Image (spheres, helix red, strand yellow):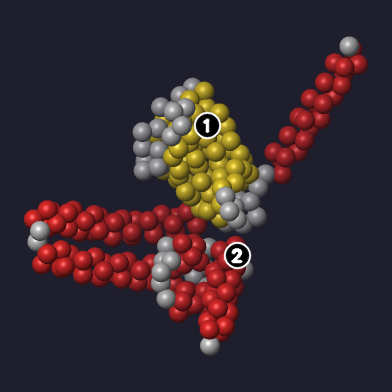
Amino acid sequence: MTSFKNLIYTAFVISLFFSCENDSDTNFTLKGNVKNLKKGVLYLQKDGKSTIINLDSVVVKGEPNFELKANIEEPVLLYLKLQKNDGQEHYIPFFADKGITEINTTLKGFSGAAKIKGSKQQVVLETYQELMTDFKNKNLDLLKANFEAVKRKDTTTTDSLYKQSERLLRLKYASIINYALNNKDSEVAPYLALYEIPNTSAKYLDSIYNNLKPDIKASFYGKKLGKVLSDFKIAQDSIK
């Protein structure tokens, strides 16, 4: 029995050793506070090839402060996910880099109320998000006006609103492309090209890619954008 206890103790010590070793290998820390959160699970996640990957997690039991750790090779978009006891899930996307990022938010306004302090890429992303807020509000106004026009069976107004919506979308895409071109020294630029303007012409994506600084071209999203363009050109050549 004594030898069995010794075996359990040895295993426990070994597990602590490897746990500490893994902690020392991490180069990114996400810490913060979720006001009024009493129970739930917080996850630090990233995009995988076909699914979301959990990097770390913590069970919250009455303490709103949290700390999550991971090892990241370069700047990348991560997610803070909240899974509440009722099964509901909420996400906060943010651009992470090595070091410390801090997220403070509330239970009620988990995503919308989040205040994020961390990487320089996050600052570029937030400026972009502020730029997009105006487009979002204008689009909501058009949707509301269209709903009212449909109720009145006012086809003249609905046709006009449709054209306005198309113009707004073109202007939004042009603004995103311009923003990416103006931030050629940030990993956010190729990220926007990949995920925010999916239906744009390949020539605009090519312009963004060729405008990137060499180190950004060699980044995770830079290489991904380069592959998308390479695959597109191969597909085009096969049609000729």
Tell me which residue sits at (65%, 55%) in the image. Answer: 73
Residue name at image x 55 percent, y 38 percent: 43
Residue type at mark 2 is Ser
Can see residue 54? yes
- Give the labeled residue for mark 1: 41
Residue type at mark 1? Val
Counting from the top left corner in percent of width and height, residue 104 is at 44, 38
**Which element type, helix, strand or loop, lies under badge 1?**
strand
In the rendered image, the vertical position of residue 116 relative to residue 135, given as above or below? above
Identify the mark nearer the N-term, 2 or 1: 1
Give the residue at the far top of this rendering: 1
Q: Identify residue for label 2.
A: 219
- Bin the neighbour count of mark 2 within 10 Å (Cα to Cα): few under 14, some 14-19, many 20 and up: some
> Could you tell me if residue 226 is visible in this image?
no
Nearest the viewer among 104 and 70 is 70
Residue 196 percent across, percent down from the top left: 42, 62
Residue sitting farthest toward the bottom: 240
In x, y percent, where is residue 231?
57, 74
Rendering coords of residue 234 (x, y %): 58, 79
- Residue at 52% x, 27% y is 60
Left/right of residue 112 with respect to residue 192 in the rendered view: left
- Secondary-structure class at tag 2: loop
Quadrant showing the N terminus: top right
Residue 149, image quadrant:
bottom left
- How dense is the environment of label 1, judged by Cα within 10 Å: few (below 14), some, or many (20 and up)? some
Residue 182, above or below 27: below
* Residue at figure coordinates x 82%, y 21% from the top left: 8
Q: Relative to 78, is 22 on the left or the right?
A: right
Q: Which of marks 2 and 1 is in front?
A: 1
Residue 103 lies, with reference to residue 144, above or below; the image says above
